Image (cartoon, grey):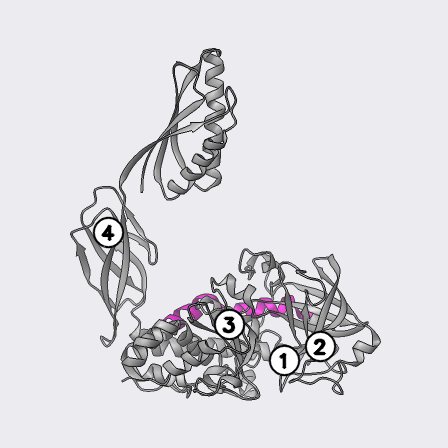
Amino acid sequence: MLPKQLLTKIGISSILLLAGSLLSPASASQIPSYIEGTDKAAVIFDPLQVNNFSMQMSDHDFSMLTSDHVNWSYEGPWLRTVMSFTMAGKVYGPYTVGVHLKGAWGSWRDVNGKAGFKIKMDAFVRNQTLFGVTKFTLNNMVQDPSYTHEAATYRLFRAMGVPAARVGYANVSLNGRNYGLHLNVETIDTTMLSRWGLVNKHLYKGGVPNFPDFYPGYESYFQVEDGSTTDSADLTNFMRVNQKSGEAWWAEITQYADIEEIMTDFAVEAYVGHWDGYAFNHNNFFITFDAAGYAHMVPWGTDQTWGGGIDYFGSGTVLFRNCQSSISCREMYFQILAKLARTANSLDLDKMIEYVGSAIRSEIIADPWGYGIQTATDYQNGAIWNMNNQKSVLSNMASAWDTGVSEISISGEDFPVDQTIVLAPGSKQAEVQAIPFQSSATSEVVTVSSLNPGLNFAEVPVTSADGQHTSTKTVSIYVLTNRSSATSLTFVLNRSALAKDGSTKVSQLKKKLKNASGLTLKFSMAKPKTTSWANAKTLLDKRASIVINALRAAGIKVVKFTKVITGSSHSSAVTLTAKYQN
């Protein structure tokens, strides 16, 4: 078994002495975009843009947001508030919304301090959203003097495939009071989870004051964020599975949870120094179950990160102990660490801190509740130093274990690693090799000599540079088949519009030809008896264009098409012959 690697936490004062002034200005042309996603909300989670939330509530309700009435463990009712949102100079609203204070033990402040806020768009107006968002979470960042820790940390989680929040920034005011710069962090809810392809049926939050782990009987220690508040059978079953260990645990946990994703969460928490998460403090985490009871974990509360790494093998949680008791899971964890080293090296998180810090600099200066620009800059420099240190330490530790694959070679041609590789019709054999990330790692050449039309799989073994770790890369190979089909499309008599039956058949064609390759089309139509040949040709041109445009709008590529006028007829149909491969 490999020795444990302890990464010593380094105090911020020592970091600053070593870091010097690491931040430097960058031209706009050098700055990458950090917007992720294609949903409407993506633009508001841009860490290089500072927006504005302006809120107004009654004096009575404002007084209800003081420590005499609410605290970190009691948020109270949603209070009616009029809110306007400004982005890039454009004002959205006003909206009638609900407002709570946001925070936990260390970060909670009432409205007499730098309060954090939750905004519920549909608290009083049914189905009301802003950019598709139902609930906004505005962190006050009182425990992040850098103002940038969460932006970088969540980006690394997401890049590693762990469902994690996106972030933007916003200045916040309430009843004319300036509450300064806040982090607009994506709320963990059904909307956010669906963006990751997760169908949430039950969402729990773990953390203060109980700091729960997955032991039987601990169900009440979790806060129900969404789903039934009385039926926790999914959580109970998850706890039951985790009473096992070794390969028996591995065989069952893989049926109930994305354990690779969960262990990736652990590795990233150690890398970024997230001592206040589930892996090292049973705090700041969500667990979601879908209708089948399948579990995913989501990290949270990453403001106190980048102060130094944590022992990658030091988690005392039930899940981590069980993983280390299983040979299969332990080997997977080694490979997760190797992937983390590669991913962190590719992201340039240190540059991200630089760019984000520059983008929000004026707002940091203007924040009446903040630590000041010098402190912010010092902490940003400290985070950069730790990022560079972590990259070096983990790369040196994990590179010899790495069985990760950068490309797949088939018969001498290279392909992206996770792409289904398409071969020509009639292909019977292929030589398949995985190309490892590490130059000293090795992969066998596997000859597949019995390819069939359709989907095939090849198992390619990879051995790490130190010879102690092996993995098998499954390569998907699709052998195309030559196909042809003929369809009669009915049009309105003497017109280019499709009849109802014709429209139905075009819809069916779009599904049938969705994955067609090398598609050629032939349109055949008899000349209407009352129409000249020239007019018949024009009519066929229009009818063919309608069909071709419908296919192209569905993302179907037409390589070539021909049109033929045959003898005269009273028919209004066009025969479409398609030849293609799939």
Residue type at mark 1 is: Pro
Residue on which the image places disc 1: 145
Residue 412: numbered disc = 4
Residue on which the image places disc 3: 202
Sooner in the amino-acid sequence: mark 3 or mark 4: 3
Residue type at mark 2 is: Pro
Foreground label between 1 and 3: 3
Q: For residue 357: magenta?
A: yes
The reply to whether callout 1 and callout 3 are in contact (CB within 8 Å) is no
- Determine whether 329 is above or below 212 in the image: above
Sooner in the amino-acid sequence: mark 4 or mark 2: 2
The reply to whether callout 2 and callout 1 are in contact (CB within 8 Å) is no
Sooner in the amino-acid sequence: mark 2 or mark 3: 2
Q: How far across and down, in percent of the image, does residue 464 sit?
A: 26, 72
- Locate residue 431 relative to residue 74 in the image: left or right: left
Sooner in the amino-acid sequence: mark 1 or mark 3: 1
For label 4, the SS is: loop
Instruction: Name the residue located 49 percent from the left edge and 32 percent from the top edge.
Output: 500
- Locate residue 151 relative to residue 444 in the image: left or right: right
Q: Is residue 464 visible?
A: yes
For label 3, the SS is: strand
Q: For residue 520: magenta?
A: no
Foreground label between 3 and 4: 3
Whole-number angstrom distance, CA of label 3 to CA of label 4: 48 Å
